[in-house]
Amino acid sequence: MYRMFETRADVMAMFEQFRSVDKADLGTSQALENHALLVMNALDEAITNMDDPEFLIDMLLTTGKSHQRFENFGMQIFWVSFCCFIVASFEDIVEVKVKG
């Protein structure tokens, strides 16, 4: 997933805690790992509660509101992040299936 930052400096600039990390060190960045865990936990919570629309809507609205504090965060950054996540996930699945 960190590969997104290698090609999208605009996305990396959104993350204050990553700005000072050299791109070559992103794969071992504790700050990036911590953020990735937060994202994965949020996804897990959303998937777990898919059958509770009220909870899911509230959670997504809260998450969206928490990202409003970032000056340049918008739909374009969201979709770039989402697409990179899907590609990275697909690559991981293929790697697991091929390596078996």
Image (spheres, rainbow, N blue to C red):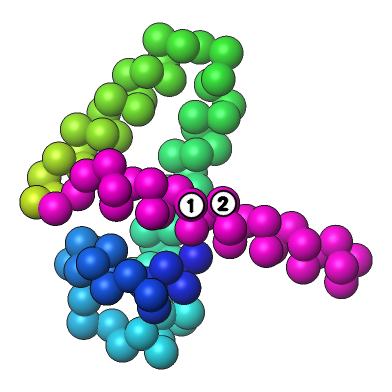
In the displayed orientation, state which residue is furthest to the right. 100
- Residue at position x 15%, y 40% from top? 68
Q: Residue at x 22, y 44 (%)?
A: 74
- x%, y% of residue 94? 77, 62
Q: Can you give x and y, in whole percent of width and height, for residue 71 in the image?
A: 9, 51
User: Along the line of sight, which residue is nearer the eye, 70 or 54?
Assistant: 70
Q: Residue at position x 32%, y 19% from top?
A: 58
State the residue position of label 2.
86
The answer to which of 8 and 99 lies nearer the viewer is 8
| 97 over 46 or under it: above or below | below
For badge 1, the amino acid type reads Cys
38 or 77, nearer to the observer: 77
**Residue type at numbered disc 2:** Ile
Q: Residues within 10 Å of mark 1 (few under 14, many from 20)?
A: few
For the magenta stretch, what is the residue range? 72-100
Element assignment for label 2: helix
3D distance between C-alphas at marks 1 and 2: 5 Å
Quadrant position of the C terminus in the picture: bottom right
Residue 38 appears in the figure: no
Q: Residues within 10 Å of mark 2 (few under 14, many from 20)?
A: few
Is-magenta flag for residue 81?
yes
- The residue that appears at 50% across and 39% down in the rendered structure is 43
Q: Are marks 1 and 2 in contact (CB under 8 Å)?
A: yes
Magenta stretch prevailing secondary structure? helix
**77 relative to 28 in the view: left or right:** left
Q: Which residue is mark 1?
A: 83
